[in-house]
Structures are given as C-alpha cells and as structure tokens.
Amino acid sequence: MMDNGVATPDTRETGPVVPVSASGKTRIASLDFIRGIAVMGILAANIVAFGQPMTAYMWPDGFLVPAGDPDDVMWAIQFVLVDGKMRGLFTLLFGAGMYLFMEKAWAKGAGRGLQARRLFWLLLFGAVHFFLIWQGDILVSYALAGFIALGCLKWRAKTQLIIGILGYISGAILALPAMAGPYLASETQFAEAMGGSETIEMLEEGKQAEIDDAMEEAALIQSGDYGGYVSHVAAQHSSNLAFYLFLAFTETIPLMLIGMALYRRGLFDGGIARGRLLTWGWIGVIAGSALTVLIAFWTIETGMTYYGTLAGFMGFSPLPRLPVIVGLAALLTAYLTAAGHFLGDRITAAGRAAFTNYLGTSIVLLPVFHGWGLGLFGELDRPQLYLVMLAVWVLILLWSKPWLERFRYGPLEWLWRCLTYGKLFPIRR
C-alpha cells in the first residue's frame, strides 16, 4: 500500500497463479471484527424476511400473524440501528477486502484476472443462494458490482473516495422518485397532480399483486413443497436480479470504492489516530442516526402504510445512512480492544468465516421455517423471530472460533478459495 495513494500497477500473469491470501501476513483484526459484527447484524435485519413474507421486511402489516409490536417500537429501533447499516458495513469491507486481495495478488505477480475468477464463483454462489435457498441474497449484487469495481482499483485513493461518496449520494437522489413517488402519488395532496385516481388505482393493483405473490409463496413454504417454492422463485422473481444491478450502481459500487479508499488511508490498521476515529465516528453515527429517527417517526405518523414504509426505507433513509456506515466502521475499529478477549475473539472468528456464516445462516434457517422441517414460517411474531436470531448468533459465536483453531479457513471460504485457484488446498492446520 503506497503512501501517495496510487495503486500498485496491475501486471500480466506470467506463470502459475499461486495463493495470495495465506502468505503468513498478519490479518487485519479490525476487518475481521467489523465483518463479524456485520454478518450477525445482517441476520438482525433479515430475520423477519426469513420467517415471514418478504412484504413484512419493511411493512409490519405483511406479517401473517399479529406482529407483536403494537406501537412499532421494535420496528423503529431496528430501522434506526440496523436496517441498511449492516449491509452497508459488509459492502464497505468487501471493497476493502478486494483491494487487500489485489495487493497480495500484485505482490505475487498475479493480475486482476484472479479477482475476476473469484467474483465469477461468488456470482454462482449467489445464484444458488437466491434460487434454491433464500431470495434475499446480496452476493449476486456484490459479484456484479465487483466486476465493475475491478476497473477502479488503480485509481488514487482520493479519487476512489470522492467518486464513491458522489456516486452514493447521486444514487440515493436518483432512487428517491422511484421509492418515494408511489407514496406521494397515492397518499398525499399531490396525488391529483401526479395522475389522480388512475395512478392510485394502478399503485393499488401493484401493491395487491405483491401481497398476492407473497401469499402464494407463503403457502408453498408452509406446505413443505420445496420444488414448488424453487419453481415459484424462478418463474416470479428472476426479474429481481435486475434490481441487484440497479443496487450495484446506486449503492454497492460506491460503498466498495469508499471501502477501498478507507483501507488505503489506514482506517482499519492504525493509520488514523484513535482520537480522530472516535471523533469522526461519533459525529457520523449521531448525525445520521438523528435524521433516521426523524424518518422513523414520520413513517409511523403516516400510519405505517405500504407505500409510506417503502418511502421511509428505500427513499429517505439512504442519505443519512452513509455517515452512520462510515462512522460505525471508525468506531468499531477504535473500540476493538474494548470488546474483551472472550467476546472479541469470537466475533473476530465469526468475521474470518463470514462467508460461511452468511450462507450458513440461510441453510440453517431453511428447515426451521419450511414446512418439510419445523414449519415455523408465518407462525412467529417479531419478538419471537428475534429469539431465533439470538439462537443463531450463539451458534455462530460457538462454532467459528473452535473451527478456525483447527482449520485454516471456514468451510465455504476454503471451497471458494479452491475454486478460485482451480486446485485443492489443505484445510487442516
């Protein structure tokens, strides 16, 4: 990593590609620790969509049972503290990890083709996850964004940071009409100017179509018809992959670029003084969270309607989310030692096996909720789903550290590595 912020030149591969991430170089503990927090936080954001229809992810009336949150307090707490922030942290770290991987690749004489192969396999993992396990996948978006971000690796760190921030802000502004427009056109005084009754009728039909699809999918899951569920996802939700491409340009690529730049600026490895991390971290978290609290109150005041929650979640919250994401990265780096040896080591191990823990969570929850297993889909309210989340957190913290004491990689990290290099690597220490 060069002091002037200029990336190491890419080179052509002139011989067999050798491993670049097991060279013995000390891992950056803060990256693993933050990644562990993020992968568990992503489950906190997603647990409702695991155990209830996807419509319930943002909209409490989408629950098949009473949500168990009559004043929407738990919804608001999750909205302010978790939703979008954990995915954002994960994306930030993915960008930092891409650059770290390429630093090691350049040192070994490899080029960006190695990273491209890595992303290709990630895309396949994501497709399997989306079509066969759970359609809330983020890996497809990461892979698609990663292919584009490959072209930005040699930019100066300052350029990556500026383009990342401007790209994120521009993406949020561009997405605002699509995400907040339906609310304005159907539930406000602007409805008449935006099409009147015809637009309202069209939006109502769109809402009902989403609810009907969610009910059809719920019936398949509850019945235990796994084949029917997979067929339904392929037939009705393949178009969702287009949204991942939209998300890649409006959020994922910008955050990856910011992550690359922050890594190169030393945010994760002591290159920035702890006092500065704490100051700017707290400013970002407090300012962004305060604005998000206002959005939460507004959403509740509108009556938690279908299009009102869409506007709050996807329309208004992305802009104040950015300083929270970066602020959390700074604070978690600064407070790493305060986590304590027992808990901190386990969270760090969870981050080292984040790929396994992310996909493993979906695999573990598949039999918990599907009818061919425990059949709990649609049966649990929000507090009960949080208990399931806590149980999975405990499982993540219990298995990750002992496994990594005996093995070099998490199981899926090892598989991904072998596929990337096209050869088998020893997994035992």
Image (spheres, rainbow, N blue to C red):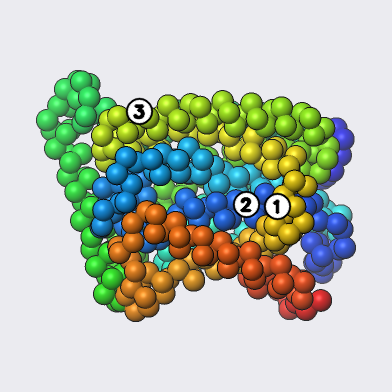
Q: Residue at x 58, y 68 (%)?
A: 395
Would you call the spot at circle 1 few (<14 residues within 10 Å), some (14-19), or many (20 or more)? many
Q: In which quarter of the image is the C terminus?
A: bottom right
In this rendering, is residue 28 above or below 4?
Answer: below
**Residue 47 seen anywhere in this rendered image of the structure:** no
Question: Which residue was labeled with disc 1?
Answer: 33
Q: Nearer the viewer, residue 238 or 288?
A: 288
Q: Do the residues labelled 2 and 1 touch (CB within 8 Å)?
A: yes
Q: Is mark 1 on a helix, strand or loop?
A: helix
Q: In which quarter of the image is residue 408?
A: bottom right
Would you call the spot at circle 3 few (<14 residues within 10 Å), some (14-19), or many (20 or more)? some
Alpha carbon separation for disc pair 3 and 1? 34 Å
Question: Which residue was labeled with disc 3?
Answer: 298
Alpha carbon separation for disc pair 3 and 2? 29 Å
In this rendering, is residue 103 above or below 124?
Answer: above
Q: Do the residues labelled 3 and 2 touch (CB within 8 Å)?
A: no
Q: Residue at x 25, y 57 (%)?
A: 65
Would you call the spot at circle 2 few (<14 residues within 10 Å), some (14-19), or many (20 or more)? many
Q: Where is residue 125 in the image (x, y as percent from the top left)?
A: 54, 66
Q: Nearer the viewer, residue 323 or 178?
A: 323
Q: How many numbered marks does the figure carry? A: 3
